[in-house]
Image: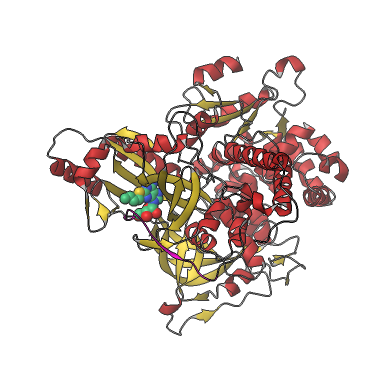
Amino acid sequence: MAESENHVTEAVAKKAQALRRALHHHNYAYYVLNEPEISDAEYDRLMRELIALEEAYPELITPDSPTHRIGAPPLDRFEAVSHTVPMLSLENAFFEKEVLEFDQRVRRFLETDDPVAYTAEPKVDGLAVEIVYEKGLLMQASTRGDGFKGELITPNIKTINSVPLYLMDSGKVAVPARLEVRGEVFMPLEAFKRLNKERLKQGEPAFANPRNAAAGSLRQLDSRITAQRPLDMFCYGVGVMSDLSPSSHWEILGILKELGLPVNPQIRPRCRIEEVLEYYNMLSERRHAFTYEMDGIVIKVDDLSLQRRLGEKSRSPRWALAYKFPAVQETTRILGIEIQVGRTGALTPVAHLAPVLVGGVTVSRATLHNEDEIKRKDIRIGDTVLIQRAGDVIPEVVKVIETARTGDEKVFRFPAVCPACHSRVRRLEGESVWRCVNAVCSAQLKARIRHFASKGAFDIDGLGGKLVDQLVDRGLVRSYADLFYLDKATLAGLDRMAEKSAQNLVEAISKSKNISLDRFIYGLGIRHVGEHLAHVLARAFGSLEAFMAASEDELIAIDEVGPQVAQSIRAFFETPENTANIEKMLQAGVRIAETPGVGLSESKRTLEGEAFVLTGALESMTRSEAKARIEALGGKVTGSVSPRTTYVVAGKEPGSKLARARQLGVPVLTEQELLERLS
Ligand code: IVH
């Protein structure tokens, strides 16, 4: 690098050092502890100041400067590096039986009948890397490669915000002269979805899963691209660690944490094999609640001297085992493609699949999203495809297995008319969906009524899809308001309806007439107004009259309501059929209960400004009751724990939110304590 023209004074050097320290500290607080101390803007300001200083005085640049996080000039190729200690792989288990056999094998090998202590960790689905710190400074980072040799990716690793560029000296453990730390680099799910959306928009192929996205992002010759990708990392082990001599794996993890390295907060330390199985079940159930993808757990013998005795065989250690979750991706065949019409008229292509078991659930349909998606993935009827299921979301097609094509596959032609009412479909500028714009299309009406009767809305028990079809097809129901005018005799005359079930349905409809404002609003099916927004609107306006009378400006003034939503709400109420329907419902006796929290006198809003997160099962009430009661006193209930959470309420078998609360230092209440606050 050319000598700079400017002369570095002591004051300038000190300033740079102070900026680096501050940035390092705030980075750790934000990305590792999740407890930001300054605003993003303030952080950016500090960063820009340091960049400016380093540009003016290049000799100030140190290997641990946070400016490295923005990436370095591209390389021609990756250099190969050897790992001092080979990076082993893991043996896989898929069934409980195999885990118990592993435990027996371990005890047989150690010649003991006593239970062995295991530490169990989430198996995060990303790619393994090794980072070398010398005298606390991040000197080198590499991929696992073949376990012996990997690729040198130091500048890329430096872009990961949770990875410290130098180790923290907390005073509790001495910073080792050399530390080779290992862990998994991954891409959080939200970031993955965002990245794919962006790529599709740019006409680039989407990544099949977060693991591919993480690998593709990390292995970039141009680390400035890596810097644009929100990667994260959890450390789970070490190669060489000088100076320190821990005696257990759990102790190693503690040391890593102490040095400022990111360690997964979900780890279950030192437990018996039975508890490991429980931990697996717990995580397996909750895996979709996490912000990253895990594909199983890793079980490790905790005691390091036992690990050494056990050793390894064929490149995987005898002391560890990966216990995988059931696959959430499977291959199957597309039998046909059907077009579904939604309540807003959107046409969604849905694939009928040869039924296949995916993660314990039989899947026979998958959404194909829209026409462009079918074209981009070149999905044809008869294709063998890879499908995936994540949580409760509708399964989707990841890609076509082209090598399985026989030539008999048929290209799907998107219809020009609505499959239900046969009116021409339209696709607006800039939209990816085709819509049926016929206001009296029966398919739209059916979808609107199904939505109206759904759990989050009027919650009408017994009003299933088949029944809705009959009611609409026979002209008995032309709007959701008509539901309240159905009588038992009419219902009993329908197919597969007995006297008793007709009676039950009449009662269910009648019961639904008493409804809270948020559910009422949600039930109307206004475009862009989902469950959450309906709740926000109900709280903001307090009454149906006030909501219906709100102008676009008044709507936009509400937090979370943008121009698009405001327009959609106004358009809804300016359509005479909609207001007539509402009038008809009120006439039938639909009554809107007072919205919790709104209009309460100050003295009753005892939980004003407090944000609660509920986790685990409560004994004296359901979670939704607890939510309603908290809100009735002016408090808020949110889904995830953040530094802004006031309390986490832990019921029976609390989930990851409890751990997160502990990590963030958020106070935890028992059910009893919550009840006291509510009374
Ligand atoms: S320990 C000898 N712990 O799984 C021990 N691996 O299938 C080697 N992985 O290459 C790894 N989370 O990429 C370990 N908590 C964890 C892990 C983990 C994810 C990955 C890692 C490894 C692969 C083995």
Q: What residue lies at 72% left-to-right and 29% top-to-bottom?
A: 595
Kindly indicate the quadrant of the structure image that contains residue 401: bottom left
Residue 443 position in % (x across, y down): 65, 61
Kindly indicate the quadrant of the structure image that contains residue 315: bottom left
Answer whether residue 455 is visible to the viewer in this image.
yes
Q: Is residue 573 left or right of residue 502?
A: right
Residue 221 position in % (x across, y down): 55, 66
Residue 238 position in % (x across, y down): 37, 46
User: In terms of secondary structure, what is the magenta stretch mainly?
Assistant: loop
Residue 190 position in % (x across, y down): 58, 51
Q: Is residue 374 above or below residue 20?
A: below
Q: Which residues are magenta?
A: 76-89
Q: Does the stretch in magenta take in 265?
A: no
In the image shown, does 611 or 315 lie closer to the viewer? 315
Q: How many marks?
A: 0
Q: What residue lies at 54% left-to-right and 50% top-to-bottom?
A: 188
In the image shown, does 640 or 125 lie closer to the viewer? 125
Which of the colour schemes (rainbow, by chain, secondary structure, one colour) is used?
A: secondary structure
